[in-house]
Image (cartoon, rainbow, N blue to C red):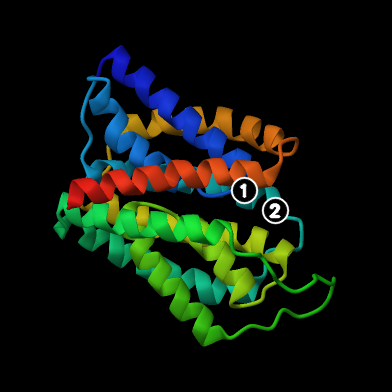
Amino acid sequence: MDIAFITTLFIIGFIGAFLSGLIGIGGSVINYPMLLYIPSLVGVMSLTAHEVSGIGAIQVFFATLGGVWAYRKSGLLNKALIIYMGSSILLGSVLGSYFSHHLSEKGINFIYGILAIIAVILMFIPKKGQAHRDGKEVIFNKWLASSLAFIIGGVSGILGAGGAFILVPIMLSILNIPVRITVASSLAITLLSSIGATVGKVITGQVLFLPSLILIISSLIASPLGAKLGQKVNEKILRWILALLILVTAVKIWLDIL
């Protein structure tokens, strides 16, 4: 692995994490297409869809671990949500990541193409959620929550993603979970999803550890910078820009598939 490839990976990780911190969604939906296309475009190395998803699983694990640690004493980590949705998403992500090595490159890209379109749509759905009150029990449909988490885990496991960009709108709009509890608890649920995805990807040999380390380092630097700037920039403008970028990527992937 030469300096040009290391530099390219660092820049990709930095941009992806910066945009993630800026707009507040998971990094995989951004990093997946950049890792898939940019290294080969600049002529440094070519990564397969399986390798890209493996790298993504490792990165999401470390990103969400830091978030959960920050919320550990907040009182916003809802144990019932984490137990029901976390166990289901963990099982789904293990299965999805393990069986993903049987899928073709086109199959994995097809799934990303679908998720990218969903991500664009979900960005503009109004986020509801109950008003949070200290001491008030959070009531939700446990079977529905578990079922949705299992599906999200399966799809996310294939891509090496945590699924937060789908999980959060579902928790708010369908399960009607309070916003502050959703933000904190979704990190813990996504952490479990990333553990499942990482285990499956490592077992099936889809993880390149040095590229993963490079992206982790760049993400730890860039994500706080993006989050800080995101507090000063109009959120609607940011969402339009990111939605456009993801949509362009989805179109490119669909053209390649077709």
Q: Would you say 205 lies left or right of 193 here?
A: left
* Extreme-right residue of the structure: 134
Query: What percent of the width, then of the height, locates residue 154?
Result: 34, 67
The residue lying at 57 percent from left, 45 percent from top is: 240
Q: Quadrant of the N terminus?
A: top left
Query: What percent of the width, then of the height, locates residue 225?
Result: 64, 30
Residue 159 against residue 168 in the figure, above or below: above
The residue lying at 33 percent from left, 35 percent from top is: 35
Numbered disc total? 2
Check disc 1 and report the residue beneath it: 67
Q: Would you say 211 lies left or right of 40 here?
A: right
Sort mark 2 into few (<14), some (14-19) or many (20+) by Cα contacts within 10 Å: some
The residue lying at 46 percent from left, 48 percent from top is: 61
Q: Which mark is residue 71?
A: 2
Q: Amino acid at mark 1?
A: Gly
Does residue 253 appear anywhere in the picture? yes
Does residue 195 appear anywhere in the picture? no
Query: What percent of the width, then of the height, locates residue 53?
Result: 31, 47
* Extreme-top residue of the structure: 3
Element type at mark 1: helix
